[in-house]
Image (cartoon, rainbow, N blue to C red):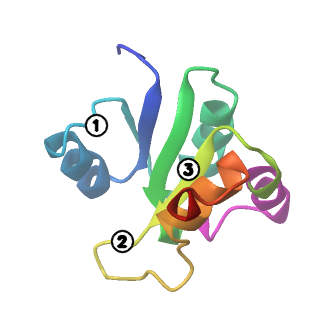
Amino acid sequence: MDHTGGILVLGDRLLVDGMRIAGVSDSIYCDERSFEKELLRVMNRQDVTIVITPIGMLSKVSWRTKQLIENTAKPIVIGVADYMGNEEESESIAWLIKKALGFDLSKS
């Protein structure tokens, strides 16, 4: 797999295939059992700046992993609504970018 950096999709086949159609080629298929292990592995990669993942899988990781995600500037982990429309825990992309950069781009 060619890891050119930038955006990586980590999740079920539906999300990964959908993001490939949208042009994101760096991806890893996983199920709920292997998700947290794969997420931790991806978070240690220097070539990944954004991880897109289903919010349903993200909400089931351990407290320790959630703290790591919140306290790490790179990569930014973005939970997106799953195919069932579960998005109540997802964060806005604008807020995540503000968190990563330290300022709000829309106010510039």
Give, as a three-letter code, the residue at label 1. Answer: Val
Closest to the camera, between mark 2 and mark 1, is 1
Q: Quadrant of residue 99?
A: bottom right
Give, as a three-letter code, the residue at label 3. Answer: Phe
Instruction: Determine the residue located farthest toward the left in the rendered image.
Output: 21
Image-based side of 37 in relation to 4, left or right = right
Please identify the dominant SS of the magenta region: helix
Give residue 86's position: percent from left, percent from top: 41, 82
Number of other residues with Cα within 10 Å of mark 1, as a class: few under 14, some 14 to 19, many 20 or more: some
Distance, label 2 to label 3, CA atoms, is: 15 Å
Residue placed under numbered mark 3 in the picture:
35
Magenta span of residues: 58-69
Distance, label 1 to label 3, CA atoms, is: 19 Å
Closest to the camera, between mark 1 and mark 3, is 1
Instruction: Report the residue at 54% width, 29% height from top.
Output: 48
**Which quarter of the rendering shows the N terminus?**
top left
Q: Are marks 1 and 3 in contact (CB under 8 Å)?
A: no
Give residue 81's position: percent from left, percent from top: 39, 73
Q: Quadrant of residue 83?
A: bottom left
Number of other residues with Cα within 10 Å of mark 2, as a class: few under 14, some 14 to 19, many 20 or more: some
Callout count: 3
